[in-house]
Image (cartoon, rainbow, N blue to C red):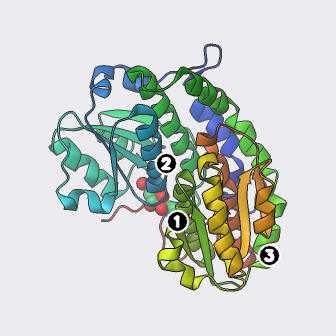
Amino acid sequence: EKGGYAHFMQKEIFEQPKALRDTLAGRLDLESLEVKLPEIEANLSYYQNLNRIFISACGTAYHAGLVGKYLLEKLVRIPVEIDVASEFRYRDPLIKEGDLLIVISQSGETADTLAALREAKKRGARVLAVTNVVGSSVSREADDVIYTWAGPEIAVASTKAYTTQLLVMYLLALYLGRAKGSIEEKLYKEMVQGLKEIPQKVQEVLDAEAKVIEFAKKHLTKEDAFFIGRGLDFAVSLEGQLKLKEISYIHAEAYAAGELKHGTLALIVKDVPVIALATQEALFEKMLSNIKEVNAREATILGIAFEGKKELAKVTDDQIYLPRVPELLAPILAVVPLQLLAYHMSVLRGNDVDKPRNLAKSVTVE
Ligand code: M6R
């Protein structure tokens, strides 16, 4: 049942190219390079006239939502608020008719996410669910549903659900951006072309697994790790640190790189592992100077950037270079080495990878 893999998590990491292909199928017209979302089309006028978008989800799904917020604001130019679902309904949210709540949930059964959905509906907003399970509670109660076609995810640590959730966020932002005329034609076409190629690019990142194993071995006995990035890279850093904590039991924190010197830099000492993401061109120089700050404290740094970014090697100990895609798509590629890092750390430390202590796959209590 694990198809020759040692663990479900490993199988699911390696299934990502297929999961992405399945989630794209029928939604990307490969001839005309247009995004199609019949799930939304039926109520397009509501979506075209949205005042505000809210996003609510838990854990990894919340991290996918963070990328979604960034994309929707950038490409659709509608303000987006995001909360973890366990906070949303307790803050008396200002959500009403004319607004949209997007809930993201692999299982579609997470109690807090379901409660957020009900709260938004009660207040008159429309709810769009992004879920992986047909017939789940969330899918039944939402007004509209876009399924991720990741297939069953068994490991507690979410991997292929996350990348397919990201993919749906891209499709949604492109579709709504097109419908509202808020996205430039050139960027639209570039991104659609990029999405078409993304499953193959993820495969290329998976092929660089050996590099990650090497880094994991070097840091096996460490008890703390830091993930730093800016913009979209910060959102991916949050997912990277959660994965590492969850299955390797290494204390990890993600920081917006510019925030480091407001406190956390005090924890960066000799040999502390720092994973630095630098995929965004406009932020690259700023990231390099943040990396230099941690380098000066003799941290051991793994840098992740697109191929061709030679400067990275001067300020980091190890590097992973991602194949080129339009830079807004970087999160789908950049998370893969972070998933592999958490996986290998967990295996090498002898943990129960698929069933980490204290955690359940689906959290149906509030
Ligand atoms: O089924 P859901 O997507 O609603 O689950 C949400 C979280 O419980 C889940 O993503 C959790 O954070 C994962 N174990 C992370 O790997």
Q: Which residue is mark 2?
A: 67
- Separation of disc 3 and disc 1 at Cα? 29 Å
- Residue 57's x, y, as percent? 38, 54
- Residue 353's x, y, as percent? 64, 69
Nearer-the-camera pick, 7 or 50: 50
Identify the amino acid type marked 2. Answer: Val
Q: Secondary structure at mark 2?
A: helix
Along the horizontal axis of the image, is 328 left or right of 108?
right
Q: Secondary structure at mark 3?
A: helix
Identify the amino acid type marked 1. Answer: Gly
| Above or below: residue 13 compared with residue 271 | above
Q: Can see residue 12? A: no
State the residue lying farthest toward the top: 32
| Above or below: residue 52 compared with residue 218 | above
> Residue at left 46%, top 33%?
75
- Separation of disc 2 and disc 3 at Cα? 30 Å
Q: Which residue is mark 3?
A: 217
Along the horizontal axis of the image, is 357 left or right of 300?
left
Mark 2 neighbour class, 10 Å CA radius: few under 14, some 14 to 19, many 20 or more: many
Marked residue nearer the N-terminal end (3 or 1): 3
Marked residue nearer the N-terminal end (2 or 1): 2
> Residue at left 52%, top 36%?
170
Mark 3 neighbour class, 10 Å CA radius: few under 14, some 14 to 19, many 20 or more: some
Q: Specify the quadrant that holds the C terminus.
A: bottom left
Q: Which residue is mark 1?
A: 258
Is the residue indicated by label 1 positioned so its CB lies within 8 Å of ligand 1? no
* CB-based contact (under 8 Å), mark 3 and mark 1: no
Nearer-the-camera pick, 228 or 15: 228
- Residue 273's x, y, as percent? 68, 76
Q: Can see residue 92? A: yes
Marked residue nearer the N-terminal end (2 or 3): 2
